[in-house]
Image: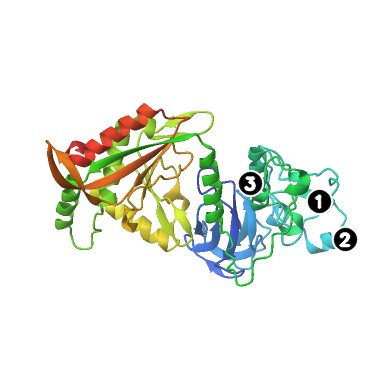
Amino acid sequence: MSTEVKLPRLGQGMESGVIVRWLKQEGEPVEKGEPLYELDTEKVTQEVEAEAAGVLLQIVVPEGEVAVGTTLAVIGSDGESPGESTDGDSPSDQATAAPEQSKAAPESKEETSAEEPAAPAPPEDGPAEEEAPSPRPGSDRPSGPMRASPLARRIARERGVDLVSIRGTGPDGRILAEDVEKAPTGAPAETRAGAPAQAPEEGAEVVELTSVRKTIAKRLTEAWAAPVFELGVSADMAEALALRERLVERLGEGEAKPTVNDVLVKLAAVALARHAPLNATFTGEEIQRHPSPHVGIAVAAPQGLVVPVIRDADRKTVQEIASARADLVGRARDNKLTLADLDRGTFTISNLGMFGVEQFTAVLNPPQVAILAVGAVKEEPVVRDGDLDIAPIVHLVLTCDHRAIDGADGAAFLQTLVALIEQPTLAL
């Protein structure tokens, strides 16, 4: 009996993904756990492994955007018919209409092109395909049934965008998430329908937005709408730097060398464990305060800014954090991160000190309620007991979401963090 390969939900909030390419072709043998296809999500592009062994009998969705749960392919025994599925309806019933059916009834409202799989069972928020009213005057969208992906419909609802006025760029005019994102909210229908983009200047480099870059744009736009405030402090890094040097001296062969940021991740995590309001996420309806700090570290990867997460950072040693960071950063730069590496962060640290930036304000990383910006460590004059001295100083700026955090919450967290930086033994 054959097994259907369906698009899994790989992360919290995932509703759809884009099939980039298949790593196996029809008729080729497949081993369980072997990379089967490449999937582009809002956060990462990753290889998805086969959940069953056998022969790839049929590829139902060669490429394109599909909803979670959609049948993508069929794996079975050599010579077996793809229709003999263990999962109920045959993939042809769920996904594509036969070519002869399309030719026999091209005017049918339920016709589906061979290139575009139909959506699976409708999600709770409504049908995958909606019947469109007659086009508005001035709209050049073709008449007929309006097709929109589940993700596109969700974004349209959140932004108050009218799908009727959007011209889809997918197969057969299907409206994709990126079409909705390009439509300004509250604009007249003629504007939302979208005018052709202005031709680039001769010699200009045109950079197509990847899914990761589109997500960055979307998330930062959300962050800009949040009412935030910033709090800045300075800390003497002498003891923290001395701790790092002692850890480096004790390194074993092949172990990752701890960085200043690894020490700060540990100390920030301990401070978060003592200040629950900062270790939280804001959902719009409630504040969720999490029991353990999962600290995200902003990494400039080739595909764009990503924030892999070091889980339970308060319980890890600095050396364990260094090993986890080295693995995550290495895979981020090789575009090998998975959704699990990026999910469920509760706080983020963005460090530009290695670029010589002395102080900056980081943009909030929703739904998290706070982010810490770390500048370069610089020798600066300080006064100690009335005497002038020179000390390695770091400038920290905490950005907070005022919907979830008050100024006193942020100030108390920073007070604890500075104390831990200047006396790291307090973190024990």
Please say if 298 is above or below 202. Answer: above
How is colour applied across the structure in the image? rainbow
What residue does disc 1 label?
A: 110
Mark 2 → mark 1, Cα distance in angstroms: 13 Å
In this rendering, the label closer to the viewer, 2 or 3: 3
The local secondary structure at tag 3 comes to helix
In the image, 251: left or right of 9? left
| Rendering coords of residue 8 (x, y %) | 55, 50
Query: Residue under circle 2?
Result: 104
Q: How dense is the environment of label 1, judged by Cα within 10 Å: few (below 14), some, or many (20 and up)? A: few
Where residue 151 is drawn, which disc sits there? 3
Q: Earlier in the sequence, mark 2 or mark 3?
A: 2
Q: Are marks 2 and 1 in contact (CB under 8 Å)?
A: no
Q: Amino acid at mark 3?
A: Leu
> Tag 1 or tag 2, which sits nearer the N-term?
2
Mark toward the viewer: 1 or 3: 3
Q: Confirm whether residue 4 shows in the render.
A: no
